[in-house]
Image (cartoon, rainbow, N blue to C red):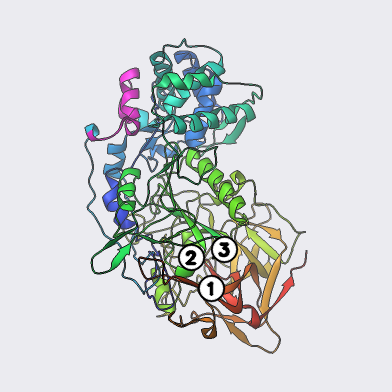
Amino acid sequence: MRGSATDPRPLPGRRGARSAAGGVAAAALLLPLLGAAPSAGAATDDAGHLQQSFASASAEYHVPLSVLLGVSYLQSRWDGHSGAPSVSGGYGPMHLTDARTALAETPHHSEGADDPRGDSARPDPRTAGDEQVPENSALPARLKTLLKAAELTGIPAERLREDESANVAGGAALLAAAQKQLGRPLSKDPADWYGAVARFSGADDSATAAAYAGDVYDIIRSGEQRTTDTGQRVVLAARPGIAPDTVQLAQTGLRSASAAGTECPASVACEWIPAPYEEFGDGDYGNHDLGDRPKAQSIRYIVIHDTEGGWDGVLNLIKDPTYVSWNYTLRSTDGHIAQHVKAKDVAWHAGNWDINARSIGLEHEGFLVSPDAWYTEAMYRTSARLVRYLAKEYRIPLDRQHILGHDTVPGTTTSGIPGMHTDPGPYWDWRHYFQLLGHPITPNAGKNGGLVTIRPDYATNRPEYTGCVTSGRPCAVHGSSEVRLYSQPDTSSPLIQDIGLRPDGSPATIDVNDVSSRVQTGQQYAVAGRQGDWTAIWYLGQKAWFQNPAKNPTAVDAAGTVLTPKPGLDSVPVYGRAYPEAAAYPAGVPVQTVSPLPYRLLAGQKYVVGDLMPGQYYYSTTFTMDSHRVVTGQDMYYEIQFGHRVAFVRAADVQVQQSAR
């Protein structure tokens, strides 16, 4: 989604661009794995209850306990989510899927709209569709495994959805059934269950099933332990020497899927589903631009999105040349990846043409305003592998200044700010994601350092939000990656104001799509003050306070590079894109106005530096590449963490310094 200086089109600030996807895609929304159920007893607060449920189901269905625990961890990290369905319609610790029920009861998208291309040089290329709840007969088997579990166990579907013990038993029944279907004995040796685990994934192809099974056995080898969302302590003892019988994959009967043409690591399952590059109408074209990256222009960012729709519907959208595009889509049930646009080409996904021209966009099956439509561990892990691969390939630093959420991409102009997207939103677990990326968020400075990195405990950090169902109505209580900001060290004081988002001066809200006064896990800010359990940071030109108690901190101390206005300057302008100066444009390429946003970086304030880059503009408004040009200027820009979103300042306006450790 593109954004040029002359292009007023922002990107769905409230995941609006994909609310169209939510419509067309909703019918195909979900994709789970094979899970099932029997057993009784609703979950209790007894810390050992769920562990015992796994042991009981293991004994009853003759499934090795480590296999049952490993599969469940990859599905849900053993959480029950209070009986709420995942984005792909999966329920409970085993992620048993009942997509039709989930679709009928879950809100699918948020409001808002903006242009993903972010460049007014071309029209907004989006369409919309109607949501439908499909019949069970129209759903693939992977989206109705809960119904199969009910047949196998005799446990009612409602109980399988709501009772964690029953859900675990259902998953065990499905695994046992898969083992029998493969003609294999119910062995006590976990290594003998590779084929059944691969089948449990619900994958359509052998590569995806193998990647899924490989993850399960990695978990078994390393072991895991954690406290679930209901306070249950679950432990999977490590079995480092286990070597599964991978030959069993051939017995599953799954088709082979070609990864030809994809740019993915060998450790994930990937297929090529190209976005069409076609002409239509009166010289119009879509749904991306041909480019010559990274040779002509560096790739500096990876942007994390959620789809606001289900897998099949979203794939229908990417095939529409009149719609928009992104580089990859990731499936929730098993982490399967589809690539649509080559890294050398420019997808229309971020609503800011400058960011589009320097980034790769990843869409994850999910919904911003459905906090309990949880993301699976399988998708988190696959996404992390893909990001690590891309970061290494294009030398992209693994930090929050380069791994952006769509909600941290800036508007290109003042008028575009209110329409920018807010996905993946407060319910994406950034702390866990960066652990999977191999770059956990840890302190790198002594106590009371000059910077802080936001890092609340996701599970226990539960700020109130509204707007998930009906305006003004509270969202479900849920863990969050975000921390709220106040104008004073007091929760009764006003929230921080964003004059770009609310130019009329109306107060900030706690709406799930209102990013005015929120900071997010992994983001870094310069400390502006400390008072008791409160910490102040510089944010949007203001001193913003957040609760940061020593016993339950929401941020850790950090050190790094910051900038401030040069001596003698009261303030400097802030930009939503790093475009070259007018003198850099050759004949035939329209000069893009370098227009500041309605913010100022004031003397005495400091902001964390993310990158230093030349002003660049990729001119591409025609189907053929004859007139395409990358214009590079002499002006250099710093990317900074300015508010919830990143921003840019001219290097000539600021001085850079290291924060104190």
Image point (67%, 74%), residue name: 563
Extreme-bottom residue of the structure: 568
Where is residue 120, by image quadrant? bottom left
Tag 2 and tag 1, C-beta contact below 8 Å: yes
Q: CA distance from mark 2 to mark 3?
A: 9 Å
Residue 286: image x %, image y %?
A: 33, 61
Q: Earlier in the sequence, mark 1 or mark 3?
A: 3
- Secondary structure under tag 3 reads loop
Residue corresponding to mark 2: 357
Q: Is residue 156 magenta?
A: yes
Q: Earlier in the sequence, mark 2 or mark 3?
A: 3
Q: Nearer the viewer, residue 495 or 319?
A: 319
Residue corresponding to mark 1: 616
583 to the left or right of 323: right
Quarter of the image where the N terminus is located: bottom left
Residue 50: image x %, image y %?
A: 51, 27
Where is residue 468, by image quadrant? bottom left
Tag 1 and tag 3, C-beta contact below 8 Å: no
Q: Is 65 rendered above or below residue 285?
A: above
Image: magenta residue range: 138-159
Question: Which disc, if any, is residue 298?
Answer: 3
